[in-house]
Image: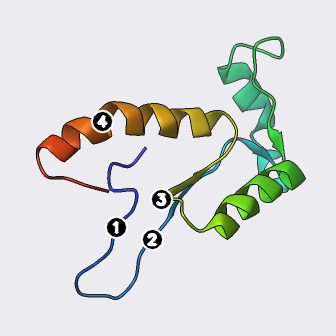
Amino acid sequence: MCPLSSYSSPLIAASYILTIPPHVDTELDLHIKDDVIESQGGPEKAIPPMPLKEYMAATTAQFEKGDEKEIAVGFLAMGVTVWRGTFVPILEQVGITG
């Protein structure tokens, strides 16, 4: 995960939202699906990809809320929560926000 997940440029009037997709079941996955399953320890241990409709519904709902710095769904949402809970307090002590 990127520590500069939300960034507003002083030179450009824009802000950015980091999207963190999980393994989503799409046509792009067709050529690597077997390798991904194997890399996770085989079919019994592999985390199945999130269905595309489920991913799009969850992601769209977060975008529509409009108050998120990161858009993360599925297993990766837990990673964002842990990262923010662990490192943000430390970074804030040295004047870094984001």
Give the spatial CA distance, label 1 vs label 4.
17 Å
Residue 16: give its label. Answer: 2
Give the spatial CA distance, label 2 vs label 1.
6 Å
Q: Earlier in the sequence, mark 3 or mark 2?
A: 2
Secondary structure beneath label 2? loop
- Residue at the disc numbered 3: 69
Question: What quarter of the picture does the C terminus occupy?
Answer: bottom left
- Residue at the disc numbered 4: 87
Secondary structure beneath label 4? helix
Q: Tell me the amino acid under the disc marked 1.
A: Tyr
CB of mark 2 within 8 Å of CB of mark 4?
Answer: no
Query: Residue at image x 34%, y 67%?
Result: 7
Residue 34: give its label. Answer: none
Give the spatial CA distance, label 3 vs label 2.
8 Å
Question: Residue 19, relative to residue 11: is it above or below?
Answer: above
- Residue at the disc numbered 1: 7
CB of mark 3 within 8 Å of CB of mark 2?
Answer: no
Q: Tell me the amino acid under the disc marked 3.
A: Lys
Q: Is residue 48 left or right of residue 3?
A: right
